[in-house]
Amino acid sequence: MAVPTIREILKKGSPDKGVAARGWIKTRRDSKTHSFAELNDGSCRESLQVIFSPENGDFASVLPALVTGAAVEILGDLVASPGAGQKIELAAKQVKIYGGCDPEKYPIQKKKTSDEFLRTVAHLRPRTNKYAAMLRVRSELAFAVHSYFRDNGFTYVHTPIFTASDCEGAGQMFTATAFDLTKLAGIPKNEAGEIDFSKDLFGKKVGMTVSGQMEGEALALALGKIYTFGPTFRAENSNTYRHCSEFWQIEPEMAFYELADDMDLAEDFIKSITKSVLEKCPSDIELFAKFVEPALMDNLRNILENKFERLPYAEAVKILEPVNDRFEVKVKWGVDLASEHERFLVEQHFKKPVMLHNKPKEVAAFYMKLEDDGRTVRGMDVLVPRIGEIIGASERENRLEVLEARMRDLKMKVEDYQWFLDLRRFGSVPHSGFGMGFERMMMLITGISNIRDVTAFPRVPGYAEF
Ligand code: 4AD
Ligand code: MG
């Protein structure tokens, strides 16, 4: 039988008879006559206080099992609570123990445990207040993304995970093969002694997508405004607080949008989903502000209240060059700005989000539209405090000859991209899009400082447990 969630019980907040609640015991304390337990079922941050009074039964035999982590069902009456902090509490009459929990061995204790330790027990850390809050916020953030695009006339599309299109350039794509790599001897080879992928399942070498953009472009040039929201994979060996090997990316793509339109959309999108989560999860966000990042509310207000700075790369170089002594990598025109530079611009100089645009073509992806100046591209990164890049965006090169020439310059195999070039052959239009790292947005909205802690089971170099 379904019983109400604790969220539903607390929301209703009124006395009631014969109510059952299920969940896990957070804590229990005993006075001379009464015992009190905090029951939490993950439906909200708040726990339901359960009171065991002698007038409602003899609980002596079950109480020792009501320890932190035990799974129980309590049947009783909801009564007005005399204590501060909650309107109602559950006066227990019957207790059913689903699963006991050995307090000596249970790794999740009420006292604070470090994030590093909790990563080693990622299967149990959602039982902590912080990680349960993170997962509820993650869910609301995902729904906010879908609502935003649906309300703004976008079509939600699904782009493939297996793909031969390496959107962001060589070196970061995981190879996906049906060959049994544990039996090297059995893998077909060509005359040059290389693996013969023509005999593999897809008849060619295929990888796991780094971005849904290219397929997204095809769909935008038919449906107008689309977005994808799915997992993407990068084999880059970056062991940092903001890189994952598997992360979720939100990628809108819009026909007839130029870079300026793309920037306006990106800014409105970030503000809108931030606002939505603040409205939907006030208690969970309060937890992060209280226990994780004291500056969280100021940071979020900063995002919501300021117009993002539109900063051409050339201007950024002018700001950064005079303070080069601060940086490991010295800035001059042509240098690809790194996290240290991005964070200086956002945190020290402008003190608000920055949209850094028109970087030199030498440090830009092949698909970005060449600017009329011939030196820069119509690309843009949204940079935010603490994290740096949260969105990568561009107007796409929609001129067939220019794109082909650029691909040849970059020594790309133009013949492999004929379908992508077809989009420039048949009814080409200016179009733009962006990719937001969902985990980075999670870091922004929760204040959690390591990407390993904004996803339930992180995949990062050297680590794929659970
Ligand atoms: O800047 P990126 O590489 O851009 C693209 O993939 C474009 N094709 C997107 C598009 O225009 N449709 O990645 C986009 C965003 C980054 O700004 C960052 O937020 C996130 O994806 N990202 C990562 N997040 C976590 N771990 C990683 N290894 C990431 N690499 C990129
Ligand atoms: Mg980028």
Image: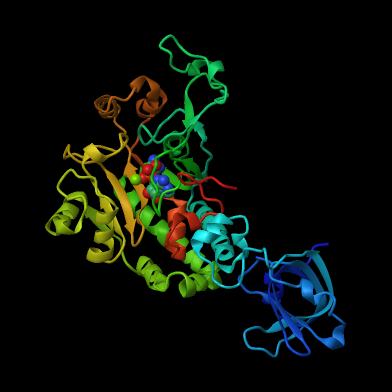
Query: Residue most toward the left?
Result: 322
Please tell me in which quadrant of the rendered image residue 349 appears. Answer: bottom left
Residue 224 coordinates in the image, percent (x, y) = 44, 41
Q: Quadrant of ligand 1?
A: top left
Q: From where the camera sits, is residue 434 visible?
A: no
Q: Quadrant of residue 74?
A: bottom right
Give x and y (percent) for residue 57: 87, 82
Residue 263 place in picture, x, y as percent: 33, 52
For the residue pair 234 and 61, the one nearer the viewer reads as 61
Colouring chosen for the image of the structure: rainbow
The image position of residue 305, as x and y in percent, is 35, 69
Task: Specify the farthest residue to the front.
Answer: 104
When the figure is inspected, residue 147 is found, relative to residue 282, above or below; the finding is: above
Relative horizontal placement of residue 273, taking residue 45 as reference (left or right): left
Looking at the rendered image, the quarter that the N terminus falls into is: bottom right
Q: Would residue 56 be found to the left or right of residue 292 on screen?
A: right
Q: So how many labels did they put on this image?
A: 0
Residue at (52, 18) in percent of width and height:
203
In front of the other: 238 or 383? 238
The residue at the point 17 percent across, 39 percent down is 375
Q: Residue furthest top?
A: 191
- Tell me if residue 276 can be seen: yes
Q: What residue appears at the point 23 percent right and 55 percent down from the top-left corner?
A: 311
Where 218 falls versus 146 (above or below)? above
